[in-house]
Amino acid sequence: MVALGATEILGTVNTIINGLLLGGLFALVAFGLSVFVGVMKVINIAHGDFAILSAYLALSLVLFFKVDPFISLAAVVPVMFVVGYSFQRFVINRVLPMGGNQPVIATFALSIVIQNLLLLTFTADARSLVRPYILEPIEFFGLSISKRYGVGFLVSIVMFTIIYIVLKRTYMGKAMRAVPYDLEAAKMLGIRPLSVYNFAAGFAMVAVAVAGVLLGMTFTFYPDTGPMYLLLSFGAVVTGGVGSLRGTLVGGIIIGEALVLGGYLGSHFQLMICYLVMLAILVARPQGIFGERL
Amino acid sequence: MVPSKFMLKRSHVYLIAVIAILALLPLWIGGFMRDALILFFLYLAAAEVWGFMAKHASMVSLGQQIFIGVGGYMTATLCMYEGIPIWASVIVSALIGSGLAGLLSFPLLRLRGIYFSIGSFLAAEVIKLMFNAWEYVGAGKGLIFTVAYGIPTMVIYYPAMVIALFSMFAVYYLYHTKLGFGLRSIGADEDAAASLGVDTFRCKALLFIFSGLVTSLVGAINAIHHTYLHPSSAFSIVWTVSFLFVAVLGGLGTIIGPVVGSAIFTALTYLLSMYIGLSLLLEGLIVLAIVLAVPEGVWGTVVKRLQLRARLKEPL
Amino acid sequence: MLEVKSVDVFYGDLQVLWGISLKVEKGEIVALIGPNGAGKSTLCKTIIGLLRPRRGSISFMGKRIDNLATPEIVRLGVSIVPEGRRLFANMTVRENLELGAYASEARKNVKDNLEWVFSIFPILKERQNQLAGSLSGGQQQMLAIARALMSRPKFLILDEPSLGLAPKIVLTVYDVVKKLREEGVTILLVEQYAGQALRSSDKAYILEQGRVVGWGPSDNLLKDERVRKAYLGEE
């Protein structure tokens, strides 16, 4: 039995706060998937790989132009928008009407392609976009808050706000909410579903790009890091409920907490506990917290 | 006296001839070809059942590596630590794999479509992490299957061949049985099938267990062949990638398709064995191209063009 | 304005419409009446492009539309208030209305068009920030009509506008139909309740079991013995 002295309580609070911040970062990674699934109703298995791809793109710019990763976003974001748009237009839109397994197989194949392209281009060495200014934790009142997680959390809130505004205030955003709700009704208002999908994919990829760069600044990454983030994002989306943006935010935080609290059982088991929690949620309550009954 | 029900059809004669040739082959070919054929048989076996699951039952499993790892590790540990003779270990580990598949059926088979796919992948990752922390199997250091050193490829060839043939015949017969029919109706429309009285859980579970059985056998033979096991390779998603490649390239859901797919896969693997990233990259691109342009796969296109399904009335 | 020529429509292998022909001239209100299941809604779906006729043709303002996708047909100036309303219940009244102007020139004049529909349906102005799903049946129908009007259509299809509504609300709806005629909108009115439809239209077609079994000026049909027995007795 662990003694419940002040240090222990403080330690737990510290962990919980870091879990919250980390969860915000996970939510950031998951937003892109949430938009994609919410609008297209297709799960992009290559989601994590697109995030890592963004990180590698940023890495190239950082190494070549000696800029800060945040600056590199100015180039990475538009590139990834085009990537997302093209991916939707030339792959997903063609595969969607085929139904069944084809979207799964296609996005899975794409995942493999991206991972191996990255492997061949950048080798299997560990990479990172960490900057010195982000390394040290913030210390106050005996708590040690991770700055990296904190920055990720802040960016996550900003991204959430941006996505929310787009969905609520713009025509395209409203179309993005209407089309998955009732496709025929949307068509009857003159909305072209494929155009909406193309934009939504590009928009989702913007979130993925930002998330990827933030991830690169927080953790080391390899060409095959993608699938882990797919699982974590998927976990966040499912926990919060498919189709709900704030659900994804909450889901991300829950996953983040599951990961850090799992650390109490030993660092070996952290990820495993987190995955088991996700599996349990998937099986027991697949509609998540804010989602509709599946 | 031949029983009246069994008639030696021409197709049966062809079949027996092919099997005879395959059985005698190792006597004539060199060690390199034998290795290649072992690879060919193993991937054929696993892809055959993966393809049936994916196409006919609409269960795209991204977790087959669970059974490769379990089949391999259990064979090695049962043989080395528990003193069970090597080939008996193979059988026992296949049973363990099937049992595990049965257990996993409960959480996983409630999930449908993409949720099942990701759930199976998730389960595989969990099991990989478990093995990484399990001292008995060597944890992160890996396991060297010393007992298997002395087994020549000549001897490994036959179990591999038998498993491949078993997988093909089993899937062929499955197609014709009531269970196979039930599974195909589930794949077409699970809710409709359920409302017609099909026990969807039982059918899917039996299929999943069967896939666990075959894939565990493949994992076991693979462990004997390569003699070194490590969680990150034994439980790697690359196994499923390869099965998917073989099945899709050949023709998803066909019986002969994986033969063609596995042949191409084996050739590709050997040609590009120096560049591991390149062969996977190529596989991914080929699968994408097939899905977008030629969804029936190589053999599937042949079947379509020659209208074999209508002519022969077989699900080849 | 709209011309349907010998259209055959199938659901898979099952034929549901046989040789349907009808014409709607500019500025007219044409009614399509007939019993439940006659194929009226199927015809609406075909005109708007959700179904494709296997034989025959459909033209709008001289241009063939039976081979166009629904969004394209709508963008030519055809608007539909579908059976069952098909509102976006997850969005507010105002958002539903704004989406009505999505695809058209009318997007520039959204504010004006909103004022216009609010003047016709003041209740919607009151509830503009409420979720569409929380409105009553009658209000939802008004919202559905208003939404279809946001694009200032040249041609409006009303599929069963009075279904499930209290008689008082039905009168409001038909007042709107009258007002729209004054604004120069051409209307195809599909109704189960023949009486009101015949009274509000210039011309009518009778659809039974997938075939046109009669047509003519609405006044004449109102007086026709067979029509009275078959359809007006149900009032």
Image: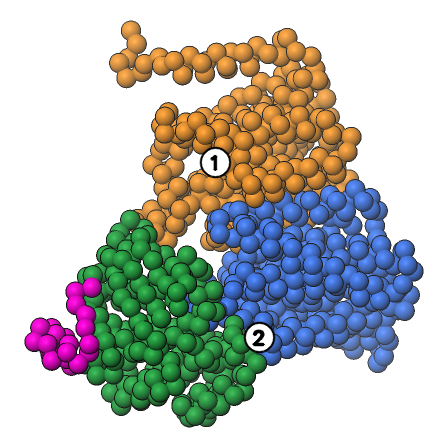
Q: Work out whether residue B13 can be spotted.
A: yes
Magenta span of residues: C212-235
Q: How is the image coloured?
A: by chain
Residue C117 at x, y = what percent?
44, 87
* Chain the render paints blue: A
| Location of residue A17 with respect to B276 vertically, above or below | below
Q: Is there a contact, CB below 8 Å, between mark 2 and mark 1?
A: no
| Location of residue B125 with respect to C106 vertically, above or below | above
Instruction: Determine the colour of chain C.
Output: green
Q: Are there few (<14), some (14-19), or many (20+) residues within 10 Å of tag 2?
A: some
| Location of residue C189 with respect to A95 vertically, above or below | below
Residue B207 at x, y = what percent?
45, 39
Chain that bears disc 2 = A
Residue B267 at x, y = what percent?
66, 25
Q: Work out whether residue B231 can be spotted.
A: no
Asked whether residue C159 is drawn in magenta, I would say no
Tag 2's secondary structure? helix
Instruction: Determine the colour of chain B.
Output: orange
Closer to us: B231 or C8: C8
**Measured Cα–Cα span from mark 2 to mark 1:** 43 Å
- Taking the view exactly as shown, the residue that stands out farthest to the top is B1
Q: Quadrant of residue C137?
A: bottom left
